[in-house]
Image (spheres, rainbow, N blue to C red):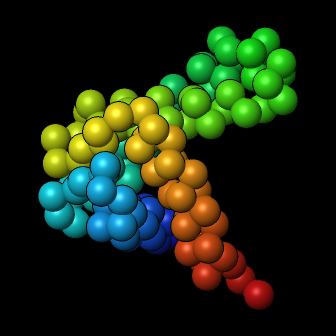
């Protein structure tokens, strides 16, 4: 149940950010839910492989290269989902930063106190 709520909140965050950022677009809530699912799958499967392959660069940059990996994950989601568009790498980087920030705020609402 918590996974479904997290996917729903991620879809809400995607819609909010697509409305705010001019370089990001989403066609509707269905596309936003698909983006949330694809992002979850990419973060679970592809991101650990990319982190392992780029470990020396990540260590040299003190972890800042992880932002580039997150932007690449967003661009992959753009490639896989038809109703989701990101114009370039810089919008993907900004989108990933703001999505992480917004998700942390929205997920804090789910925590049991």
User: Along the line of sight, which residue is nearer the eye, 43 or 91?
Assistant: 91
**Apparent side of residue 28 relative to residue 10 in the rendered image (left or right):** left
Q: Is residue 57 above or below residue 30?
A: above
**Apparent side of residue 57 relative to residue 50 in the rendered image (left or right):** right
Which quarter of the image is occupied by the C terminus? bottom right
Residue at 15% over, 58% down: 27
Displayed quadrant of residue 86: top left
Q: Position of residue 20 (x, y in %)?
A: 36, 67
**Apparent side of residue 111 relative to residue 60 in the rendered image (left or right):** left
Query: Residue farthest to the bottom?
Result: 113
Residue 22 showing in the rendered view: yes
What is the total number of numbered labels drawn onto the structure image?
A: 0
User: Along the line of sight, which residue is nearer the eye, 78 or 108?
Assistant: 78
Residue at 83% over, 21% down: 59
**Apparent side of residue 12 relative to residue 100 in the rendered image (left or right):** left
Q: Is residue 64 above or below residue 85?
A: above
Q: Position of residue 39 (x, y in %)?
A: 43, 44
Q: Position of residue 13 (x, y in %)?
A: 42, 66
Residue at 31% over, 49% down: 23
Displayed quadrant of residue 111: bottom right
Q: Position of residue 8 (x, y in %)?
A: 39, 68
Displayed quadrant of residue 51: top right
Residue 42 showing in the rendered view: no
């Amino acid at each position: 149940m918590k996974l479904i709520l997290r996917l729903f909140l991620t879809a809400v965050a995607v819609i909010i950010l697509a409305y705010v950022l001019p370089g990001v677009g989403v066609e509707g809530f269905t596309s936003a839910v698909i983006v949330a699912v694809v992002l979850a799958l990419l973060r679970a499967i592809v991101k650990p492989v990319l982190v392992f392959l780029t470990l020396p660069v990540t260590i040299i940059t003190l972890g800042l290269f992880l932002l580039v990996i997150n932007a690449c994950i967003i661009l992959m989601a753009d490639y896989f989902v038809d109703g989701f568009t990101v114009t370039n790498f810089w919008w993907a980087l900004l989108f990933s930063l703001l999505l992480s920030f917004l998700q942390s705020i929205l997920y804090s609402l789910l925590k049991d106190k």
